[in-house]
Structure formats: structure tokens, C-alpha cells
Image (spheres, grey):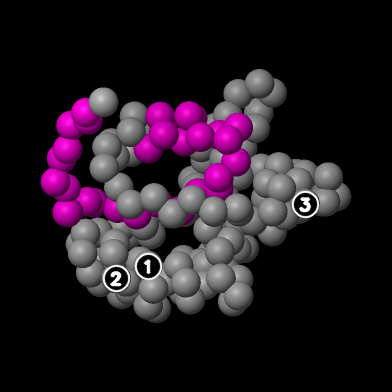
Amino acid sequence: MQYSFENIHEVPAAVFYCLDPRFRQQTAEFLKGELGLENFDQYVAPSGPRVLAQEATRGIFLDMVKRVSVGLHHIKEIILIAHRDCGAYGGSKAFSNREAERATQEEDLKIAREILRKEFPELEKIALYYLEIVGDKIEFQEGR
């Protein structure tokens, strides 16, 4: 089987999001439909952007961003997406309520953003999003 090949070495953004398969399709649709991103560097790991907030995993991901996303692909922005009921945090059951869960994850988003700003001051934008489950729908809400 043959596939087409596009030699894309410049992309506008890098995106950090969780590998949770429950949200894969919706995340792809949001990135393409709402944010207009067809091509971007993907950093997909348990908890998504939390890998930047945690010292144990931060260096590995910062090195990849530096060498590949910034150095080779010349990104202009990074998008960080956290989501409700993330297993890496123990799921929603690990929190006393939805606000506590969101506050914890948004704190990690802010830590990740500050680390990225310090490491890559040339970036034009670092956007934060929180994927919220509302009934049987999923909403991407801008981080606070």
C-alpha cells in the first residue's frame, strides 16, 4: 500500500494532550475545526501537559520541543490541553468536586506555561485549554 508524502518541515504549533482514547477524535476535530491546525507537532502522553509540570518528565519533553518543534519545525505557539477525569490524576473520583479537579489541572497548566515561557521566550503564544465533560458532550474551554 502506498501513501502520499508531504514534506512539511514548518508547522505553526505544538500541542500537548493526553493519550486518553475517549477524547482523541474530538481533540483532532477541535484542533482542525476551531483552531485551524491541520499540521502540528503532537506530544501525546498520559496527562498531556502535566509532563511539563512534573520535574521527572519535564526534561525529556523540553528537549524534544527544543530540538524538533522549535529547532526544526519553527513553531510559533504551543497549545496545552488538560481534561476532566484524567486517569493520570486518579480520575474525577480523586477529587472532592469538579472545581477542585479543574483547579488542580489548571495549576499544572499554568506551571507548564511558565516553564515554556522561560525556556522559549520567542514563542508568540502558549494557549491553555480544559476539556470539560458536560452531560454527554465535550467542551474545550479556554484555561483560566
- State the residue lying farthest toward the front: 1
Q: Position of residue 95 (x, y in %)?
A: 82, 51
Q: Identify residue for label 1.
A: 64
The residue stretch that appears in magenta: 2-31
Can residue 144 be seen? no
The image shows residue 23 at horizontal and vertical percentages of 55, 34
Location of residue 74 (image quadrant): bottom left
Between disc 3 and disc 2, whose residue precedes? 2
x, y percent for residue 77: 30, 57
Q: Which residue is mark 3?
A: 90
Quadrant assignment for the N terminus:
top left
| Mark 1: amino acid | Met
- Give the mark nearest the N terminus, 3 or 1: 1
Q: Amino acid at mark 3?
A: Gly
- Residue at 58% over, 29% down: 138
Q: Is residue 22 visible?
A: yes
Mark closer to the observer (3, 1)? 1
C-beta proximity under 8 Å, tags 3 and 2: no
Badge 2 crowding class, 10 Å Cα cut-off, few under 14, some 14 to 19, many 20 or more, is few
The label nearer to you, 3 versus 2, is 2
Identity of the amino acid at label 2? Arg
Disc 1 + disc 2, Cβ < 8 Å: yes
